[in-house]
Amino acid sequence: MSSHREAPEISKDPVADNTDVYAFVSPDRPGTVTLIANFIPAQQPNGGPNFFEFGDDVLYEIHISNSGTARADISYQFRFNTKIINPNTFLYNTGPIGSITDTKNWNRPQYYSLTRVQRGGDHGWDWDRDGRGELLGRGLTVPPVNVGVRSTPNYAATFTNAAAHDLGHGRRVFAGQRADGFHVDLGSIFDLGVLRPFEAAHLIPSAAAAGVNGVQGTNVHSLVLQVPFSDVARGGKTPHDVLDAGSVIGVWASASRRRSKVFDHDAGRSVSYGSYQQVSRLGNPLFNEVIVPMAEKDLWNSLDPHSDGRFAKYVTKPELAGLLPVLYPGVFPKLAAYTKPRADLQAILLTGIPKGVVPGFQNNTGPVLADMLRLNLAVPASASPNPIGLVAGDAAGFPNGRRLIDDVVAIELRAVAGATIPLVDPSYTPDGAAAVLTDGTSNTNSPFSNSFPYLGTPAGGYQTQPAVPAS
Amino acid sequence: MSESTRRRFLIASGTGAAAVGVAAAMPGVAGAQPVARTPKLKLPENAQSLVAHVSDPSSGTITLFLAEHEVVVHDPDLVARLARAAGSKSSHGLED
């Protein structure tokens, strides 16, 4: 998946597991950028009575680099705390939850604080130290999960807007459960790289079929933050010139845990000690999932983007590019014969696209090799967004930031298959299949909204249908 | 920290020198005497529960994890006493 369970260690710690990061110019609020970081993958909506929630012992952060260093110049820190209102019941709720403040029936509300830290330099930097931090909000309410039609009736109308908190100075925040907007055919891709629409051409062929969205019906927990450009752009300015290096920001998200955890037998739970250590990270979709070898995925999660030079060799010679000609015999002969380092992928994933490659566009952040989503804030939101994004001529889409509608699986498949090599090596003509590759999926969860927090209403527990039995 | 919790920290540390409870690091506690029989300790007023981590005993360094912070202490003698205490009780010795 994009980054769902993408590394051995974090796959065992879902509460801290990044799944997707998005960054886009807000289509309905020009002059603001929306940053989304999703966590806790593959939530079965009916997972009661202990439904999914953010971790009180996890530090969640969204980072911005705007100075060309690939280090965090701005970090937004989310810290959660959970209350048990009635200690005498096993239930999440003891009646219909009528509002986001209804703690009469809602037994386990969750709250959070949001802090903006400038150049903290490490995770969990004391926000009050050296005056680098600003507390933007505390006691902010997380909406209940979508339990079902009786427990959380009229979920979208009751809870979504109520959980969108205005913080002043043009800032808005939402933290809570949403439908997973990512889509991918998990079952096929991890079955020896099958893409169902093209499986007749696979090494082990079968009849072509439609793609199956492997995250259909599942939820995630989302942090959605909308801030003015001046909050994140270099020098606090509002960028207008696409070709100005100061118009580009790098974005990534992380989750960190305290370094030590001890099980307190008297309390029957674990207690954490020490500073925060990053355990999950995500910038570009699929980077750790598909680019980084399994033996180094946990290490990658613990490092910051400015350390990514050590992984560049996996970008310039990606394993998947070598597999495609093997798995699809005769389909990718030009890719198989291409032996140069993949400068196109390095530009897309590690430096941003420099001036002169795509006319009138750039999202380069300098020479530091770093996996970040790079968003040129001077590119306005597209009136007719194309899910294939920049490759299809829509400069407001991935890999210029990432919108919810961007089909990043198809875009990255095509890029790895060679479709973007001509951007940096005009002598190369891609294989015909490279331009049409897709896993055949689309978003089959709740539709996206045109307004904040944009992600779809989470699937309800009562409404959940069991998956197809194994065969 | 309750006495029973201190004992459990020591029991946990008995599996090796890699991780030890702070109670074991206190003067007079790091020897072979079980914590339950330790006389009153002189502690700072703000003493709080913490975890001491000795990742490499030969370095003589202890990292203390407390609240959201860490304190690194270089005290080879203390590390040696901890290692001796842990080593001498590594299999069964710290059980009541």
Image: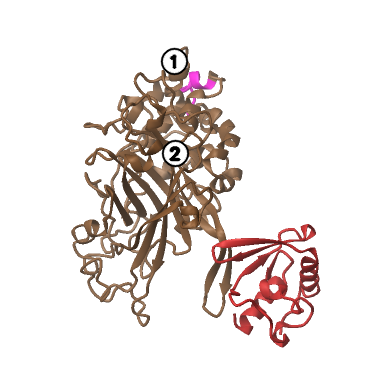
Chain colours: A brown, B red
Q: Earlier in the sequence, mark 1 or mark 2?
A: 2
Q: Tell me the residue that label 2 is attached to.
A: A284
Front one among B80 and A198: B80
Q: Position of residue A412 (x, y in %)?
A: 42, 32
Please name the amino acid that badge 2 sits on. Answer: Asn
Q: Is residue A14 visible?
A: no
- Total numbered labels: 2
Q: Position of residue A224 (x, y in %)?
A: 33, 50
Dot 1 corresponds to which residue? A429
Residue in the picture at 33% in, 49% down: A225
Camera-nearest residue between A209 and A178 = A178
Q: Dot 1 surroundings within 10 Å: few (below 14), some, or many (20 or more)?
A: some
Inter-mark Cα distance, 1 to 2: 26 Å
Does the stretch in magenta take in A331? yes
Q: Could you tell whether A317 is left or right of A88 in the image?
A: right
Name the quadrant containing residue A462.
bottom left
- Choose top left, top right, bottom left or bottom right for residue A313: top right
Q: Is residue A24 above or below residue A357?
A: below
Where disc 1 sits, the SS reads: loop
Magenta span covers which residues?
A328-336
Q: Residue at x 33, y 32 (%)?
A: A239
